[in-house]
Image: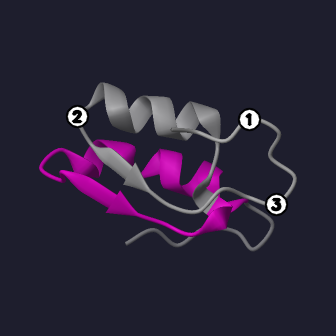
Amino acid sequence: MLLSEGQMSDHEGAALMRDALSSARILIGDKGHDSDRFRRALTARGIEPCMPSRRGRTAHPA
C-alpha cells in the first residue's frame, strides 16, 4: 500500500511501487496507470500490463 499526495498522478505512484511487484505476472490497472514508461518497466520484469488506454492516446499499445 502506498499513501501519496493528492496531486500525484496514478502512474507516478504506481512507479514507486514497482519493486514490490516482483512476484506478479499480470498487473490490472485503470487508465490513470497508463504510460509508456510504466508499461515498459512492467514488461521488462515479465509482468503483463492489463489496463485500458487513457483517452487521447495516439499510439495504442499492443
Q: Farthest residue to the left: give it.
A: 23
- The range drawn in magenta is 9-32
Quadrant assignment, res 53: bottom right
Q: Secondary structure at mark 2?
A: loop
Q: Which residue is drawn at the image coordinates 57% and 56% (left, top)?
A: 13
Q: Disc 2 marks which residue? A: 46
**What's the amino acid at mark 3?**
Arg
Q: Farthest residue to the top: give it.
A: 44
Q: Disc 1 marks which residue? A: 59
Whether 24 is among the magenta residues is yes
Task: Give neighbour class at mark 2: few <14, some 14-19, many 20+ (Cα, 10 Å).
Answer: some
Q: Is residue 54 left or right of residue 24?
A: right
Question: What whole-number distance in Å separates the C-alpha atoms at marks 1 and 2?
Answer: 22 Å
Q: Position of residue 2 (x, y in %)?
A: 45, 68
Q: Secondary structure at mark 3?
A: loop
Task: Give neighbour class at mark 1: few <14, some 14-19, many 20+ (Cα, 10 Å).
Answer: few
Q: Position of residue 62 (x, y in %)?
A: 51, 38
Dot 1 and dot 2 residues touching (CB under 8 Å): no
Front in this rendered view, residue 1 or 46: 46
**What's the amino acid at mark 1?**
Ala
Task: Say which label, 3 or 2, has the lower sequence index.
Answer: 2
Determine which of the numbered discs, if any, sits on residue 55 in the image. Answer: 3
Residue 52 versus residue 25 in the image, above or below: below
Q: How is the image coloured?
A: one colour
Q: Position of residue 57 (x, y in %)?
A: 80, 46
Whether 53 is among the magenta residues is no
Q: Which residue is drawn at the image coordinates 37% and 45% (left, top)?
A: 18
